[in-house]
Image (cartoon, rainbow, N blue to C red):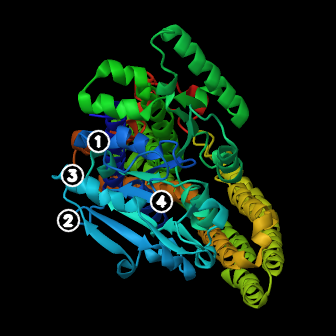
Amino acid sequence: MSMERLDQQVDAYITWKRDLVREITRYRGWLAHNRLSSEAVEQRLERALRLLRSDQITLAFVGEYSRGKTELINGLFLSGYGQRMLPSRAGRTTMCPTELFYDPRSERSYIRLLPIETRLGDTSIAELKRAPRHWLNIALDPSDADNMAQAFTQVAATKPMPVEQAIQLGFHPDMLEDAGKPGQVLVPAWRHALVNIDHPLLRQGLRILDTPGLNALGSEPELTLSMLPSAQAIIFMLSADTGVTASDMDIWQQHIRQLDDQADGNLFAVLNKIDVLWDDLAGDEAVDEAIERMRRSTAQQLGVSPADVLPLSAKQALLAHVRGDRALLARSRMPELEQLLCDRLIAHKERLLEQRVVCQVLALMQNSQQVLHQRLEKVDEHRKLLASHQQDNGRLLEELTARTRQDHALHHKRLLGLKTNQRLLKRQGDLLRGAVRAERLEEHLVRLRRTLRDSLTTLGINLGILHFFRNVETDLGILEQEVALANKMVAAIYQRHNQDNPLHGIDAPLLRIEPFQRELRNLQSKADHFRLRIRTLLTEQRTLSRRFFGTLVQEVIGLHQRLRREVAQWSSDALTPLVQHSLEQKQQLENHMQRLKSLATDSQATGQREQLLERYRAELEQQLAQASDMIRLLRRPSPVQRQGKVVTLPTAAFAASERTPA
């Protein structure tokens, strides 16, 4: 099967996620059984489970037309059908952005096609996805490869229309093919395609995005402002028979290069069609040298590492898979791309889950474990005292109960202090939320909508969007000041806790808004770039300008919503580790005090008292063993780490420098 190694790696990744879900669910049950749960802890664990269950991997293919994007997808994922499935030939083939995924809610495979005329409205593709009536639905029969291939030809469909209408749809006439009739051009028949098929990798959560060339990237703002930035890896396609052309560089500079920060290093260039360089007369060594020269030249032109440029032949790889020709597959160099996707894409996803899920849940579990250790130490201490005072251990038990009651009173006092800190943090949280309140953004949006509606020129629209970004940036600057005060307050609270509990230090969870500020700057940069492009100043392009800025505004609204959720969650969760630690200690002290009181008032013999205390100790040891087992399983290295022979995970953080590449 094609991409066998990636298939195995994704399967291992999904299995690892299922293990995490199982252990977190088990921990919830353990907390409930031991009466150690709280609403804040429940909410945090529920968010972790929701993140694990909704996690996906999106792989986007981008490049000018006729670079082999679709052929590469055929070779990577669809060669099992024994033929070319997605249309791939010389010239333009895929005419609209196409998403391939598995929909578990649907009983049948399908292609859904969104008419190009929907561009005349203001409704986004994301919104239209929730309205099936706007789409043409074509049923697929996975058992009939010919039927599937025939259905897939629809993504390459075009239709003739007058130049004026094409401009209204956002196309630039210079980038369209002539329809053979005066004043008419060919435009894509469809705006977007959704393909739901049952494929092993897609079933495991992989999602593939195939994009057309520069024409579509420039005329479909949602593609470059939302879909591509949300991908976990981006493959930029080039052709060895043309090198890096002017249009390739245009796509790279306008739409791809700035995504490197968001893709976290998972941005690759594929130099396709290296089979044009194959020369049996020159020999393999000369061919390899020629390919390497082109690889380094391409890396220099794009400003990336040569290691991130992969020469291959998608056509020969597809042929090799269909024929089962391992020698041809190796010569096509497709396995190198598969290896890179395994090493970088899956490892990146694992790191994200470790940071966003594993570390946080481990901190909660270690709180529980620490409290149990303290209780067990107390029980052992009491057993030794009872053994040394066998003649009057009834009175000793009363004294131990009184001591525990004092510890409980002291702990209760600390808990009251922590609740006072919670109220202080809540007030600071109100200031944080006030700095990014939805009403404030709505005020900016009202002014912007008025500008977009009333402006008679694209220039007026551009100025309106410029002022909008400046206002939002100012609001985030005010929030930044409040965040600094809130982080200082939380750091001081944790410092006092760590001084009182030197054996149980906890790092303060600080609020970080830098990623949101960086994302806003990226959006503003795209707006500036669009504003300064000469053709956007044409009156005919006002429809595209409105749609571009409308999409841009939706991205800012989404960013603002995520920022508000982040601020609200942090405000409610910042002290959760301390609260959980205190509540667990309180519960254990009360339980311990009750056991000691029962033993002190019991008229049983000393031996029976020791047996009851030993039974209590055994119960604690059992709880501790369960907690240790959950922590051990949760700290088990992720699949890529295990392949790299990494056998332990850091407790608080997962440093990339400690990972050995697979």
- Separation of residues labelled 1 and 4 (CA atoms): 62 Å
- Separation of residues labelled 3 and 2 (CA atoms): 21 Å
* Residue with the mark numbered 4: 95
The answer to whether residue 59 is left or right of residue 75 is: right
Q: Secondary structure at mark 3?
A: helix
**Which residue is drawn at the image coordinates 24% and 61% (left, top)?**
109
- Separation of residues labelled 2 and 1 (CA atoms): 46 Å
Label 2 is placed on what type of residue?
Answer: Glu
Q: Nearer the viewer, mark 2 or mark 1?
A: 2
- Separation of residues labelled 3 and 4 (CA atoms): 21 Å
Foreground residue among 394 and 620: 620
Name the quadrant containing residue 245.
Answer: top right
**Which residue is drawn at the image coordinates 50% and 78% (left, top)?**
117
| Residue 161 in picture, x, y percent from top left | 52, 75
* Residue with the mark numbered 2: 107
Q: Earlier in the sequence, mark 2 or mark 4?
A: 4
* Residue with the mark numbered 1: 622
Q: Nearer the viewer, mark 3 or mark 2?
A: 3
Mark 1, Cα crowd under 10 Å, few <14 / some 14-19 / many 20+, is: few
Label 4 is placed on what type of residue?
Answer: Met
Q: Quadrant of the N terminus?
A: top left
Q: Nearer the viewer, mark 2 or mark 4?
A: 4
**Which residue is drawn at the image coordinates 49% and 39% (left, top)?**
345
Where is 295 relative to 41, above or below?
A: above
